[in-house]
Image: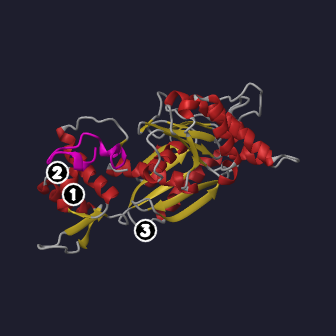
Amino acid sequence: MSGSDLPRGAVEATSPARSIVAGRALRHAAKVLPEHARAHNRALVLQTLFHQGAMSRADLSRETGLTRVTISDLVAELIDDGYVAERGMREVTGPGKPAILVDLDRDGHRIVGLDLSGSDRFLGAILTLDGEIVARRDVAVPTDPADILGAVRELARRLVADAHAPVLGVGVGSPGIVDDRGVVLTAPNFGWQGVDLEAALRADLGLPVLVANDANAAVLAEYTFGGAADDVLLVRVGRGVGSGLLAGGQPMAGSRFAAGEIGHVTVGTDGGPRCVCGKVGCLEAWLSVPALDARVAEPGADRDAVLRDAGERLGIALAPIVGVLDLSEIILSGRPDLLDGTLATATVETLRTRTLASFHDGVQVRMTAQGEDIVLRGAAVMVLSGQLGVS
């Protein structure tokens, strides 16, 4: 439900803090307690401006269902806080005094995003509140796992120092299983177990920090900026393999925060390469960027055959998920030279042979259009949601 669907003066029931796109909520509706109403209404105003752009105070009142007095009070407060700015007069089209337009001050603050999913480099960016990247930094992934945390902390410090504007917060997309407090419970490729990355960065930077699995961050960016469907699985292929899942517009984390961890699912009974986790035949051992690059580089290797085999393995892993959840769309995120074309085609063909044809033949498998920025932009969505209640 959008603000325009509400009766005048009502408080919207769906939490705008988890609403990713106007009209699409990430959490089920819940009653707003009176003591939370002001914060909720403040977030509702920011959410409306974030998605709909500059409008008058009267427009905001109509769109949100809040009274003009409430809107005037909230807008004044948000201007004082530096989150909203007046944008001049609306062009006059009739009699009466032209209205003053207000909008989210998209350049007034910055967001720092980190993407730790790359096979050889950690990526960092400074973003506006609108998700636009204005500066970038990167650093090589250390060869010694003992040096990884230090490299991440130094990259974050440099980005914050380069922001040249108040930093709203820091968002991080990390490989591995990450709990709701930003602790990386396990990241086999880093040798991490129980690393409290969120607390470490917060202590260093003195700023709000949010850490999530990189694929879960990526699917937020695809849903916000890429027009993904309500039922979508995003497969993130980099140093490892993981996925982010939305079902009915709702993110799925799982009871142990491991939903979407398809990289260590065994995808065949014919053996296969040994995975970093110690098992034989994991999807990640076939599909990760280092694994694919190594197999393609072998003397006499048939590139198309290698990619076709990896695509078939991915289709084997995805078929039960498509069958159980009736997904309409699967998005691939990673290097297009590896994932697009032969590999994606083999994935679709395998899905068709392993699911109910009359229902699942229409499942789309496509590359994201956001390229390597997808996790960085997803990190920005995390901060916007956590700090302003908009996404």
The residue range painted magenta reads: 1-24
Please give the label number shown on residue 193. none
> Quick one: 359 or 165, which is closer to the camera?
359
- Of tags 1 and 3, the one toward the viewer is 1
x then y, percent, for residue 219: 49, 45
Horizontally, residue 230 falls left or right of residue 154, namely left
Residues at discs 1 and 2 in contact (Cβ within 8 Å)? yes
Type of amino acid at the residue the image marks with label 1? Leu
User: Residue 267 location in percent, x, y?
Assistant: 68, 30
| Residue 7 belongs to the span the image colors magenta | yes
Residue name at image x 29 percent, y 58 percent: 49
Tell me which corner region of the image, top left, top right, bottom left or bottom right, holds residue 95. Answer: bottom left
Q: State the image quarter where residue 60 is shown.
A: bottom left
- The type of residue carrying mark 2 is Leu
Binning the other alpha carbons within 10 Å of mark 1 as few (below 14), some (14 to 19) or many (20 upward) gives many
| Dot placed on the residue nearer the N-terminal end, 1 or 3 | 1
User: Which residue: 69% across, 32% down?
Assistant: 282
Q: Which residue is mark 2?
A: 66
| Cα gap from disc 2 to disc 3, whole angstroms | 35 Å
Residue identifier under label 3: 164
Nearest-to-viewer mark from 2 and 3: 2
Does residue 160 lie above or below 260 as drawn?
below
Q: Is residue 162 magenta?
A: no
For numbered disc 1, what is the local secondary structure? helix
Q: Which residue is mark 1?
A: 60
In the image, residue 275 lies at what x, y percent?
72, 34
The disc, 2 or 3, on the residue closer to the chain's N-terminal end is: 2
C-alpha span from label 1 to label 3: 31 Å
Residue at the top extreme of this rendering: 269
Q: Please identify the quadrant where the N terminus is shown.
A: top left
Q: Inspect this view and state whether residue 114 appears.
A: no
Kind of residue at disc 3: His
